[in-house]
Image: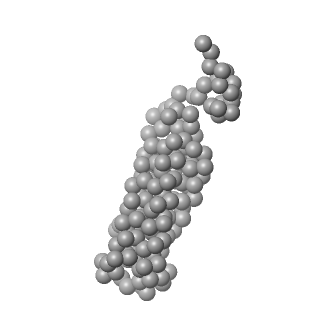
Amino acid sequence: MTDMRSERQTGYPAGTTAPDPTGWVGWILFAGMMLILVGCFQAIVGFVALFDNSFYVHRSADLVVSVSYTGWGWVHILLGLLAMAGGYGVMAGKMWARVYAIIYAGIAAIVNMTFLSAYPVWMTILITIDVLIIWAVAVHGNEVKGNY
């Protein structure tokens, strides 16, 4: 039988199929998983900031943006939860999630940069992962749509 799904259902013109996925689809799945993982890391950083202020290298007054560690904790927890939701959407091939992931990763990189003096090595790692997420989603994001 022929496939009678409309463009509205598949996202492609009637009678056509989605192009075959390339090996770059793995980068999108990587970006989605990294968003979920970064979300967990952000939440952990937030909980540490809430419950153990002495863990960090500098006092909160020495940060680029002078906010209490309690305030930073809630910011990181919120960013973590948002990242986990976006990671799921990216892996599902949703356009809103791709746009969201790029915006989120950009904001998270800036927030992590302002938190850099509190925990330099870890924040540098998170900034690097945010840049990889932006690259993967921006360059290869459309390859997941309709394939999984």
Which residue appears at 48% of the width and 84% of the height? 66
Outermost residue toward the bottom in this view = 61
Q: Is residue 89 visible?
A: yes
92 vs 121, nearest the viewer: 92
Q: Quadrant of residue 23?
A: top left
Q: Is residue 22 left or right of residue 4?
A: left
5 vs 101, nearest the viewer: 5
Colour mapping used in the image: one colour
Which residue appears at 63% of the width and 31% of the height? 10
136 vs 90, nearest the viewer: 90
- In the image, is residue 102 above or below residue 52? above
Q: Is residue 44 left or right of residue 32?
A: left
- In the image, is residue 106 above or below residue 75? above
Q: Is residue 25 left or right of residue 54?
A: right
Callout count: 0
Q: Is residue 125 visible?
A: no
Q: Position of residue 53 (x, y in %)?
A: 34, 80
Which residue appears at 48% of the width and 71% of the height? 75
Outermost residue toward the top in this view = 1
Q: Position of residue 146 (x, y in %)?
A: 56, 34
Which residue appears at 57% of the width and 49% of the height? 98
Q: Position of residue 15 (x, y in %)?
A: 67, 21
Q: Position of residue 112 (x, y in %)?
A: 45, 69
